[in-house]
Image: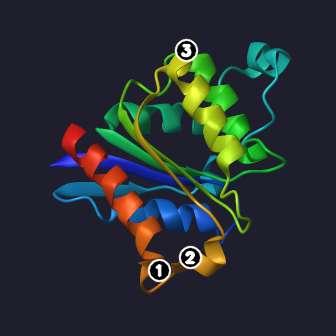
Amino acid sequence: MKKVLVFGASSSRNSINKKLAIHAATQLENVEIQIIDLNDFEMPLFSIDREGETGIPEPAQLFKKMLKEADAIVVSFAEHNGSFSAIFKNLFDWTSRIEKGMWENKPMLALATSPGARGGQSVLSHVLKDFQYRGGNIVASFSLPSFQQNFSDDAGITDETLNTELMKQVAILQETI
């Protein structure tokens, strides 16, 4: 059975991005879903000096191992001031020091959501443009605007048009794994 690594790129205990990532991943068929919480990967802020003194922290090495073992990745990016959350950026910086192609060319469904009408489109556009240089194989993407108005913990995406678009993107990932 194929293994899908799933996470929200946020440190919020009630992350709306984690909810979206889990919802999307559970629409996949015949896969084993491994959900992780980035709070389990906290480590010192990346610095070249710290790397030289103490090496790569164990959480970054564990994350890299999980990426290697996965057959696909579903991640939803929180947008903080138009960019990545601090916890994700730090994990990204450390892990990319292990291997430039950190994402392992695994098929990826890249998502974003926010309480606002743009749904994290700024961070998602950054991901779509730049991850290819780090071994990112983004085969599908989706942005959910106005999370609280368009998502229910019980029903998932409540707007029919948005739900149909997410299901198209999930189907694209499903075909690649």
Image quadrant in which the C terminus is located = top left
Disc 3 versus disc 1: distance between alpha carbons? 39 Å
Judge whether 122 appears above or below 114 on screen.
above
Disc 2 versus disc 3: distance between alpha carbons? 37 Å
Figure quadrant of residue 51: top right
Figure quadrant of residue 90: top right
Q: Position of residue 99 (x, y in %)?
A: 52, 16
Pair 3/1: label in front? 1
Amino acid type for the residue under numbered disc 2: Asn
Judge whether 106 appears above or below 13 on screen.
above
Amino acid type for the residue under numbered disc 3: Lys
Disc 1 versus disc 2: distance between alpha carbons? 5 Å
Element class at badge 1 = loop
- Tag 1 near tag 2, CB within 8 Å: yes
Q: Which mark is residue 174?
A: none
The residue under the point 36% across, 50% down is 169
Horizontally, is 141 left or right of 33 in the view?
Answer: right
The residue under the point 40% across, 59% down is 166
Judge whether 68 appears above or below 79 on screen.
above
Amino acid type for the residue under numbered disc 1: Thr
Q: Which mark is residue 158?
A: 1
Q: Which mark is residue 150?
A: 2
The residue under the point 42% across, 35% down is 67
- Label located before the other in sequence (3 or 1): 3
- Label located before the other in sequence (2 or 3): 3
Element class at badge 3 = loop
Q: Which mark is residue 100?
A: 3
Judge whether 95 appears above or below 169 on screen.
above
Element class at badge 2 = helix
Q: Does residue 132 show up?
A: yes
Q: Position of residue 92 (x, y in %)?
A: 64, 32
Mark 2 nearby-residue class (10 Å; few <14, some 14–19, many ≥20) = some
